[in-house]
Every structure is written in C-alpha cells, then in structure tokens.
Amino acid sequence: MAQIPASHSPSQTDPSDWKYVSEGGATIVFSYVGPAHPVFTGTVLRIRKVPVQPGADSAVPEGEPDEEEPDDPSIEFQNRITSLVVPLMHLPVMESVRVDREWLAKLSALVQNKRPELRRLKDTIDLGRKKAVIATDLVGGKGLAVEIKPKWAFLPNPTYLSEETKETKLRNCRFCMHAHEKQDSGETVATGYCPLDLFSGDEARVSKTVKDLWDAWVQSGGHINNLKIFVEGVLIQPSQASQLLAPVLGLPADTDINDLLAPFTKALLPLLVETKLLPVIGTLQRTLDAFDIEGLVRLWNLSLTNTGGDPTAVIASNTPQPTMDEWVSFVQEYLSTNAISGYALEDINSPETQKRLRYYMMAYLMSATFKDCSVILRLGSGLGDRITVIDLDPKKIEKLRTWEVQDSKIVRGFKESLQAGKVNIAPCNDAVFRV
Ligand SMILES: [Zn+2]
C-alpha cells in the first residue's frame, strides 16, 4: 500500500471547506469549496457511514495508533477490476486520503442539519475511520450535472426461469415490476420510466425515458432516486428549476418549468444516445447474470447435491467473501470467455458448469454492482460533455440470498396484481410476452 502524503489529508483543511452533496446507503459525499488547493480543488470526499446506535458514539474504541487501515475497497476494486471492463474515460479518478476522529466529528456536527431526516435517523459518519476517498468532483463547478440511476438493462435469459415466473419476467422488466411493488408500499418511485428504453440506443425511446424521469422528478418534488439534477454543484429541486436550471439551459430565469423539459431533453440526448458507456453497462449486466437468480439458485442446489453437501442450505451460506485476488482472476476469466457473447451457453446440469459455481456466484455479484450504479452526465462545464459511472462497489456474497427472496416476492406480487387487474401496466418495450 502506497504511503499517503500529509498534503493528502483533509484533516489539514477546515471542515467548513467541505460542502455536503448527497449520500447513499453506505457513504456520504462532500465537495471541496475551500481556498485553492493542489489536491482537493475539483474533488469530492466520500466517507463511510455506520448505523446510528444511541449512546454508542463515545464508546467506539479508538483504533491502535499504528494500526494500518486498508484503503477503501472501492479504490482497489476500481483499480484492479472495474477498470478492466469499463473504459477509463468513463471512470472517476479515485485516491485514498487520511482523516482523523476529531476532524470527522467536526464535519459530522456541521453537516447534520443538511442531511435528509430519514438518513439522519438511520446512520452517521463513521468516526472510527482513518481513511476516506477523494474522487473527481463530477457535479461541482460550472454548468449542469445530471445523475441517473439506470438500473436493470435487460430481460432475463429465459432458459432457467420457472414456469411460474417466466411469462411475468419476460413481460415486464425487473425495474418496472419492482417500481410497482415499491409504489404499492407507499414509496416514491419513478413509475413510467423503463430502463429498457434508456438502454435501447433508440433516440425516440431514450427521449421518452428523459421525459418519464423528468415527470417523476417534478411530481415527486425531486424525491426519486433515479434522477438528480445539479446546477453549479447544487442539488436542485423542481421548485428551483425556473430560477436555477433555466439559465444553464440557455433560457431566461423564470421560464415556466413546463417549458424546460424540451431543452433539458435536447441537452441530454446526444450524450445518452451516442455514449459507449450505457451499452457497456448493459452488456456487463446481462452477460454476468447468465442464468437469472433462479438459475443460479438451481446451480447452487445441484452443485451441493452432487458434491455431497447439504442440499437444503440456502444460497451462499457458509461461503467466504471473494478476495481481491479472486476478483482479479474472475475478471480475467470473464474477459477471456464471456465478455462479447450474449447469454452463457453453459448447461447448469453439467458437472463442468457446477464446478464453476463460485465463478457464476461472483459473476452475479458483479452484475449486481452494475445494476446498482449511477451515471453522471456533465454538460456545459467548458471541459467537453462527458458521462461517468460511479458507485461501483463490490457486493457482499450473502446478498445472493436476499436477492433470491426479493426476486420471488417482487415477481409473485406483480403477477398476482396483474391477474387480479390491480395493476394496469403495458408490457415493456422488448417484452417477449405481451399478454
Ligand atoms: Zn420496464
């Protein structure tokens, strides 16, 4: 692990030099707004969070002073794995930096009232961390930045789908089914948006997705997580669009919000249609998820049965996490065999395929990473329009069981609602079944 120079320590800066940008489930992001700095200008700082445990803060032990904390796994995962499958021009530059408890505590106190209440109740900055990540600031500075969380780009390989789920899974894509379930349980979701359209490369369909995301953004007051709009580094809400978004689209401030969709679409469309990044993400998702979770679970069961294991064990039980070296071998094997073809041709009933169970489990995990990533479009910054993919962290192997349960729940619930006439949703474009 390379030594981190002292100049690369945000602890040497004033915590107020870092402005809250946004947060996901695991990390919170700040952008540097302090005086010109050779390392931090133009960067964001990403810090890990921990669940809130009332009264536990002061009890968190200080680490041993000379104990070396590894770099955040997201850095190594990008440097050694994802950079082999995603063109570098579409990845942010990432670097490890040192932080300390006192500085993190000050930053945490400063930011509390900027964070959404629901997040604040759930988690907080992990004060025990000695390292954080700085990365290219993709939303700060001049111009417009748009973050899209595209989600699942494909309909599953039908080969190993059960009779019970096949028609449903080939009628509507995973996102559209899941959105429906979330809406049913009262969540704010981008219903209407279908990732199959976004990934189609077809101008009319991509244009429709921009409209669908925009409509959901406006209707939800900016509270969907598939679209975020930043103007000069500030995350804006629909109520601010006339004032803040209109000028970066070349329109006078005070332009009616309904007149912003067309120029907004026009600004995004060339990048969304022409970029090689979306096809790369779509191909990775699809080829890495060769069997669907249903087929993978069957492969797990067959493999256990045929090797004398406990055939009732749920997927990934007693299974170690992939190491970074295993990920490197995995991605090399993937690139040499499966990167270009469509669905894998392997038969899960073959002992040869069953021997490769771990390969396919890791493949599914990596597919999930790309199903859960975000892309950021940067426009009008004066540096050329560009699109970058972020949030490519490795997933934990025990998530396979979570996804198996979730898949079954989503599909069965959606199927029942369809049959009962409780939902009225057309088949997605590209659907195999249109009943
Ligand atoms: Zn869909």
Image: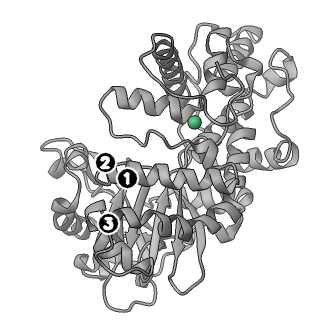
The residue positioned 53% from the left and 38% from the top of the image is 396
Real-space Cα distance between discs 3 and 2?
13 Å
Question: Which image quarter: residue 386?
Answer: bottom right
Residue 296: give its label: none
Describe residue 78's horizontal placement relative to residue 274 as left or right: left
Q: Which residue position is annotated with label 2?
A: 220
* The residue at label 3 has a CB less than 8 Å from ligand 1: no
The residue positioned 23% from the left and 53% from the top of the image is 116
The residue positioned 53% from the left and 20% from the top of the image is 411
- Residue 61 makes an appearance in the image: yes
Real-space Cα distance between discs 1 and 2?
5 Å
Residue 33 appears at what percent x and percent y? 32, 82
- Residue 24 makes an appearance in the image: no
Real-space Cα distance between discs 3 and 1?
11 Å
The one nearer the camera, 288 or 279, is 279
Say above or below: 165 vs 214: above
Tell me the crowding category of disc 1: few under 14, some 14 to 19, or many 20 or more residues within 10 angstroms, Cα based: many
Q: Give whichever of discs 3 and 2 has the lower sequence position.
A: 2
Describe residue 52's horizontal placement relative to residue 132 as left or right: left
The one nearer the camera, 200 or 106, is 200
What amino acid is labelled 2 in the image?
Answer: Ser
Tell us which disc is closer to us: 3 or 1.
1
Q: Regarding ligand 1, which quadrant of the image does it lie in?
A: top right
- Work out which residue is located at the far left of the displayed protein and give it: 55
Residue 222 appears at what percent x and percent y? 32, 54
Q: Which residue position is annotated with label 3?
A: 236
Q: Give whichever of discs 3 and 1 has the lower sequence position.
A: 1
The kind of secondary structure element at disc 2 is loop
Say above or below: 253 vs 229: below
Q: Quadrant of the N terminus?
A: bottom right
